Image (cartoon, grey):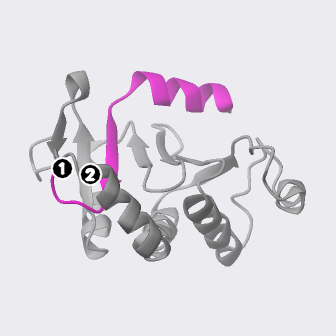
Amino acid sequence: MLTLIDWLLDNTDCYYIDFLPETMVSSDYFEIEEFFYDTYIKDFSKKIVRIIVKILGYYPAQIYLTEFPDKIDSNFKSLYPVEEDIRNKPLKELAEIISYVIINDVSSVEIILGENEKSLISVKGGFSIDIYNISEERLKLFNTLIEQENLFLRKEGEAGKIDSFKAGAV
């Protein structure tokens, strides 16, 4: 399954979820991001969990954890083996795993959605939540769910340029 994940990461369009409505081009960006990491990351993780749980109600999914850094709690590693589909875990447990990855910025949760046309949600920790290979239909639903949480869906553009998502612009 990691081959499919790698292919989606490398070969398809990427959208990302952001807490800022526009790209911030400021020398203060990293200080501001650090402030939000210290004060907002737990709230952000709750919002992402709510979005993902809702999405799991719409699409069949497979959920995988990637490798853990050496410093991670070995009990956590033994409970959640790398490359094993954990989708059948209870939603409360999945929520705890996703929050743990976001808050502690360790490992990643890779969520493959759909049966025929595959999309990928990549939760890499911190504020890094990316979505790959998303159809126009899914994009509209995702945007609605993301807006419900007062977050923003943005498309990564060519040559590192970031374009805000606009309904109907896809």
Tell me if residue 16 comes above or below residue 40 in the rendering: above
Residue flagged by tag 1: what amino acid is it? Answer: Met
Task: Please state if 84 lies on the left or on the right of 5 as rendered.
Answer: right
Can you identify the residue that label 1 sits on?
24
Using a 10 Å C-alpha cutoff, classify the residue at mark 1 as few (fewer than 14 neighbours), some (14 to 19) or many (20 or more). few
Which residue is disc 2 drawn over? 29
**Tag 2's secondary structure?**
helix
Q: CA distance from mark 2 to mark 1?
A: 7 Å
Image location (x, y in percent) of residue 59:
49, 57
Contact (Cβ within 8 Å) of mark 2 with mark 1: yes
x, y percentage for residue 26? 17, 47
Which residue is pictured at 24% across the width and 41% down the height? 155
Q: Residue at x 50, y 74 (%)?
A: 42
**In the visual, does 148 lie left or right of 50?**
left
> Can residue 44 be seen in the rendering of this structure?
no
Disc ID at residue 49? none
Query: Which image quarter is the C terminus in?
Result: top left
**Where does the magenta region start and end?**
2-24
Q: Position of residue 94 (x, y in %)?
A: 66, 67
Crowding at dot 2, Cα within 10 Å, few <14 / some 14-19 / many 20+, comes out as few
The kind of secondary structure element at disc 1 is loop
